[in-house]
Image (cartoon, rainbow, N blue to C red):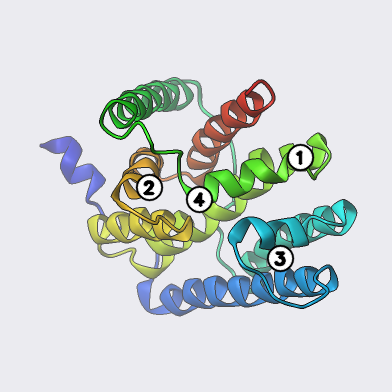
Amino acid sequence: MNDLKKLGQPWSVSWSETWWRGLLVIIIYFVIRTAAEISLMLNNLPDQSVASVTEALAAMTANPILFLLKEIALVLLVLLLLKLFQLPLLKGLHFEGDKVKWTLKIFVFMYLLEILFSGLVTWLQPEYAGPDNQAAVESMLGVLPYPIFFFMVVIAAPIVEEIICRGMVMTYILPKYPWVGALVAVLFFVFLHGPANITDFMTYFILSLGITFVYLKTRRIEYAIMVHMLQNFIAAIAMLFI
């Protein structure tokens, strides 16, 4: 019961001063990201139209160097927005031994749940091939040099997605209501990955729930980023051998 009370304690920020800043960070990020990705696609599509997510990603990655610069720019953009809007989410980044061990335990538990769910899906839905988003990302491995692919999946994506999905939503937009913020963050992350069915939804829900719990417990974004990086690191390495 005491642990639940601690998890439900509001963040120590002034909601009236932070909610609009957090919201603006999210809006500005997605506007600039969308503009950058559309620009990359149009530069590599003769008829300026796409029929699928995979085709869109293929167009964006046709020039690996430009794609890498886009990924680096988006990370820097998020960091710049935090600075401009005076949101000290990354202030005093550090890792503590006990918290690292606890976070790793949660990661292992979460990963085992993912394996269990994957096995259940294979048994009940043998025709299921995985989320479209995952297939699209895997298709990029055949286009991008592996170091660029690794940077995107293991470094850039976890940093940006955790700052946007959990940092902004839980810490600054809904700091007075931690449980509501956690639920919104979980769902925001899931739908950001475009689930097409309930199986897709649950695939990302398990991951999002685990990372959100880590952030809610530690109140430190670096631990959420760490879990996300570990998850994507395993996936990126596995893709080399599948």
Residue 85 seen in the current view: no
Name the front one of labels 4 and 3: 4
In the image, 145: left or right of 6? right
Q: Secondary structure at mark 3?
A: helix
User: Relative to the observer, which residue lies in front, 40 or 44?
Assistant: 44
**For marks 4 and 3 on the same chain, the one whose residue lies earlier in the sequence:** 3
Instruction: Using a 10 Å C-alpha cutoff, classify the residue at mark 3 as few (fewer than 14 neighbours), some (14 to 19) or many (20 or more).
Output: some
The disc placed on residue 77 is 3
Position of 124 with respect to 38 (left or right) is left
Structural distance between the alpha carbons of marks 1 and 4? 16 Å
User: Which residue is the site of mark 1?
Assistant: 142
Q: Amino acid at mark 4?
A: Asp
133 to 105, vertically: above or below: below
Which label belongs to residue 98?
none
Graded by Cα atoms within 10 Å as few (under 14), some (14 to 19) or many (20 or more), the crowding at tag 2 reads: many
Query: Which is nearer the N-term, disc 1 or disc 2?
Result: 1
Question: Disc 4 to disc 2, how far (Cα)?
Answer: 8 Å
Residue at the front extreme, as displayed:
127
Write down the quadrant of residue 75 in the picture: bottom right
- Which amino acid type is marked by label 2? Asp
Q: Determine whether label 4 and label 2 are within 8 Å by CB.
A: yes
User: Which structural element holds mark 1?
Assistant: loop
- The amino acid sitting under disc 3 is Leu
In this figure, which residue is indicated by the disc labeled 4? 132
Which residue matches tag 2?
200
